[in-house]
Image (cartoon, rainbow, N blue to C red):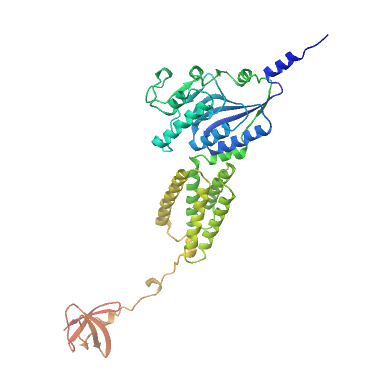
Amino acid sequence: MFISIQPTLVEAESTGEGKLVYVIPIEKTVERGLEAFLKRTTQEATEANADHIIFEINTPGGRVDAAANIAEILQDLDIPTTSFITVEALSAGSYLALNTDHIYMKPQATMGASGVINSDGTAADKKAQSAWVAAMRGAATSKGRDPIYAEAMANADYDLPKYGAPKGEYLTLDASSAVEVGYSESTVEHRTALLNKLNLNHASIIEMKPTLAEEVARFLTNPVVVPILLSLASIGLIVELYSPGFGIPGSVGLLSLVLFFYGHVVAGLAGYEAIILLVLGIVFIVLELFLPGGIIGFLGIGAIVGALFMSTNNIGHMTMSIGIAVLLSIIVSVVLFKTMGFEKGFFRHIVLKDATTTEEGYVSSVNRLELIGLEGKSVTPLRPSGTGVFDGERLDVISEGGFIPTNSDIKVIKTEGSRIVVREI
């Protein structure tokens, strides 16, 4: 009796038994923290010889630069990839989905609406829009999809009323429309159904999750959070200068600065050279408090600003963030100076407060009131100042207004400190 093992092998092949599948989430905003997470997880999948990678996507989009870097990671993978859109893949999210080999969607899921929007909510310039449209078209073409729909997602000039995108509107595909245009291969209810479609229902599944450090880094590198951190850092340190001792404001400022660089280091945006430059800048500023000149202080500020720029690949956004922080710091400094002056905090150690006031017995000159009414003679012409003699005492005097010749009879009419005013009799 002969037993054939071929059916068993075919069955194993059709169910994915013995295969390894990595499931990697693409969630929340697309930014550099997500890029670092995907770089780590796809590298782990490659090193583990995974047979398939499923990206479960639910994102409203995000930064174009981060999406471009992530797309490069996806295109370089030799492992078959599938995007499973669970809720939405909008803007940069649709671009990431187009860079994978297969796309599946849940019934309520959508993808598209990929116009480039600046951080202030306005449309990007034509150069940026053209580059983004080309990137969307290239992503679709690279995986054998009709590029016209990818272009319509990023270019509102296309007229596709059949899919709810007349001219002037960006294309957004629902699950059925995506299947119709060939962007989604099928609509599935859940991951199990997707694995059945991929013949991987008996495969070993490894679900990747962001570590706590990666979650924190994603939050700290968010484009909205960066200017807040820098503003808190600058304002906290400014307020500390006006506060006695080192307390809450200074702690908040230093913590904000530490969090900024921590997030950017974990996300792979900042290296140790940026940290070294930051520490060097802080040392220079501390030295400036004890050394005259001001040059070391400016070098310290320059080093810190340089460290900030070394921690980003978006110079424009970093410039805007630093500008916001500086503006808020100036406003807070003016308010604190008007309300507190230099009498408290660090400034009380470096600003001279002692004054020789009249109340304390200090006078710049004696006001000789006893001379008023005294008569004498001018020993020099008064033009209008000159010299007069009063009871044998020579005094510097000034005439009330006009010229007074020598040996004229004069009378003191007013004294104002060292100023003695006379009138010709």
Q: Is residue 117 visible?
A: no
| Quarter of the rendering occupied by the N terminus | top right
Residue at x-position 58% and y-position 43%: 268
Q: Is residue 391 left or right of residue 404?
A: right
Asked whether residue 213 appears in the rendered view, the answer is yes
Reply above or below: 120 against 285: above
Measuring from the top left, give residue 177's x and y in whole percent.
48, 18
For the point 42% across and 33% down, which residue is it?
130
Q: Measured along the vertical axis of the image, is residue 45 above or below residue 300?
A: above
Q: Position of residue 214 (x, y in %)?
A: 60, 38
Residue 249 vs 124, above or below: the answer is: below
Figure check: 356 above or below 306: below
Q: Nearer the viewer, residue 134 or 229?
A: 134
Count of all numbered marks drawn on residues in the image:
0
Which of the pair 318/423 is nearer the observer? 318
Q: Residue furthest bottom?
A: 392
Picture quarter containing residue 82?
top right
Q: Describe residue 332's horizontal placement relative to residue 408 as left or right.
A: right
Q: Position of residue 88 (x, y in %)?
A: 51, 26
Residue 356, quarter of picture:
bottom left
Question: Residue farthest to the top?
Answer: 1
Q: Quadrant of the C terminus?
A: bottom left
| Camera-side residue of 287 and 145 | 145
Residue for point 55% across, 34% down? 72
List the single residue furthest toward the right.
1
| 207 and 371: which is toward the camera | 207
| Residue 102, x across and y down, in percent | 57, 23
